[in-house]
Image (cartoon, grey):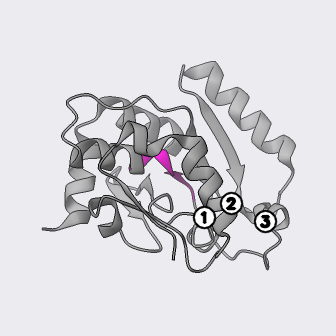
Amino acid sequence: MDYEAQIKKWIEQDAERMEALSIAADLCLPDWCLAAGFVRNLAWDKVHGFSAATALNDIDLIYFDPKDIAEARDRRIEAKLRSTSAFPWSVKNQARMHERNVDDPYTSTTNAMSYWVEVETAVGATLDASREVVLVAPFGVEPLFNFTITLNPKRPKPADFRKRVAGKGWQEIWPELTVVDA
C-alpha cells in the first residue's frame, strides 16, 4: 500500500481539513504545515474504521521563520485566523521552539518535528503552489498504520512520553493502539 497517497486522499476527502489547509496557505508563511493531530488523528480514525472524524482540540499551524521569532507574532497570526474561521488554531514558529525544548537550534520545520516526543505525531500536511497536498513527515507516514504510539528515539524522554500518552487519552479514543516506548 502507498501510505502517503492514502493519507493525501483522506485529507483531500475531508472538507474541513482542506478548508483549514487553504486558510493556512493564504498566510504565505515560510516552511509551514498543519501538523500533529491534524494528520495523526485522521489516520488513526481511518485505520480504526471510524465513520466520523474525531474532533480536533486544536489545529497546529507550525512554520519556520528565524527572522522573527517573537511569540507575539504567533498570537497575532492566531487572532487573524480566529477572526476568519472557527477552527481552534494554535500557531508556533519552530525557529524558537528549540529554546523551550533545550535543543540545538532547529534548521527547518521538518527538523523541528524530528524532535517531537512521539514518532506518529511528527507528521503534517501543507499545500504546494498548485494547492496539492504535500506531507511533511521526518519519520515517514507508515507508523500511522501500525497501531502504535512510539517514543521518538531522537528525543528519549520516556517520562514525558508516558505523561503525554496518559494525558491525551489516545488509547481510550483509539483502543487498538499499543505503546512502544523502547
Percent position of residue 168, x then y: 55, 42
The residue tagged 3 is: 101
Instruction: Tell which circle, 1 or 2, labels the residue nearer the N-terminal end.
Output: 1
Report the amino acid beneath label 1: Val
Residue 141's label in the rendered image is none
Q: What is the magenta range?
A: 32-39
**Number of the front mark, 1 or 2:** 2
Percent position of residue 136, x then y: 44, 64
Instruction: Tell which circle, 3 or 2, labels the residue nearer the N-terminal end.
Output: 3
The residue closer to the viewer here, 76 or 176, is 176
Residue 2 higher or lower than 84, as above or below: below
Residue 117's label in the rendered image is 1
The residue closer to the viewer here, 181 or 137, is 181
Determine crowd level at label 2: few under 14, some 14-19, many 20+ residues with C-alpha closer than 10 A.
few
Report the amino acid beneath label 3: Asn
Percent position of residue 9, x then y: 21, 49
Is label 1 in contact with label 3 (beta carbons under 8 Å)? Answer: no
Q: How many marks?
A: 3
* Circle 3 SS class: helix
